[in-house]
């Protein structure tokens, strides 16, 4: 008899009442806000990339060289901001707006390596960085070689 008093009371809810309660407590979708944030932050990142391209053009580099140097600079900035913990905050705010540009690539490479910071910068972060970046670099370089060979013979 004492066990029956310890059980919570049973509440009977109809399917319609449950649906109403679920709609009341379900968070409202924030799709429009997320899209706007992604658009503006992604646009700011791309505008910064264009400023860097223009800077390298101003220094006298050809268009292709300036674009390559700007891409490398943006990857460096993405990796640096990830290491400082800033890029994760940008990602929380902007979502896909921070992932799609090339800086998101740098973040995806550096971020897993940062989890091993407690093991030291050389044996922890450095070693993990190369294990994450290794497959990406191998497949990227292999693909570029294959495409280069195909381009050579087609031309």
Image: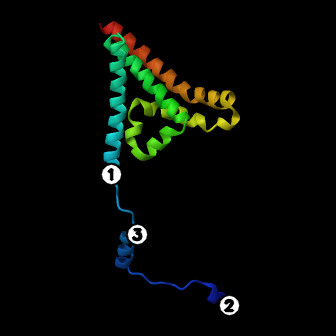
Which of label 3 and label 1 is nearer to you? 1
- The answer for how far apart the CA atoms under marks 1 and 2 are is 53 Å
In which quarter of the view is residue 42 placed? top left
Q: Would residue 112 appear left or right of 41 to someone viewing this image?
A: right
> Residue 98 occupies which quadrant of the picture?
top left
Measuring from the top left, give residue 109's x and y in whole percent: 52, 31
Question: Nearer the N terminus, badge 3 or badge 1?
Answer: 3
Question: How far is mark 3 from mark 1, CA to CA?
Answer: 20 Å
Pointers 3 and 1 in contact (C-beta within 8 Å):
no
- Looking at the image, is mark 2 or mark 3 earlier in the sequence? 2
Q: Is residue 50 left or right of residue 113?
A: left
| Quarter occupied by the C terminus | top left
Determine whether, in the image, residue 117 is placed left or right of residue 105: right
Mark number, residue 110:
none
Q: Which mark is on residue 25?
A: 3
Which residue is identified by label 2? Answer: 2
Tell which tag, 2 or 3, sits nearer the viewer: 3
**Residue 17, placed above or below residue 149:** below
Residue bearing the label numbered 1: 33
Badge 1: how crowded within 10 Å, few (<14), some, or many (20+)?
A: few
Residue ID at (60%, 84%): 7
The image quadrant of residue 49 is top left
Q: Earlier in the sequence, mark 1 or mark 2?
A: 2
Furthest residue to the bottom?
1
Disc 2 to disc 3: CB gap under 8 Å: no
Q: Nearer the viewer, residue 8 or 122?
A: 122
In the image, 26 versus 47, the foreground residue is 47
Assign a secondary structure to mark 1: helix
């Amino acid at each position: 008899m004492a066990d029956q008093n310890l059980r919570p009371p049973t509440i009977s809810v109809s399917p319609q009442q449950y649906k109403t309660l679920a709609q009341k407590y379900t968070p409202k979708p924030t799709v429009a806000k997320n899209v706007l944030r992604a658009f503006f932050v992604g646009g700011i990142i791309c505008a910064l990339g264009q400023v860097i391209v223009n800077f390298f053009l101003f220094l006298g580099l050809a268009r292709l060289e300036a674009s390559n140097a700007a891409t490398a600079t943006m990857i460096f900035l993405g990796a640096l901001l990830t290491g400082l913990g800033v890029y994760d905050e940008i990602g929380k705010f902007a979502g896909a707006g921070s992932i799609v540009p090339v800086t998101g690539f740098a973040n995806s490479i550096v971020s897993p390596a940062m989890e091993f910071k407690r093991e030291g910068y050389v044996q922890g972060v450095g070693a993990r960085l190369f294990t994450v970046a290794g497959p990406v670099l191998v497949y990227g370089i292999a693909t570029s070689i294959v495409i280069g060979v195909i381009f050579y013979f087609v031309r």
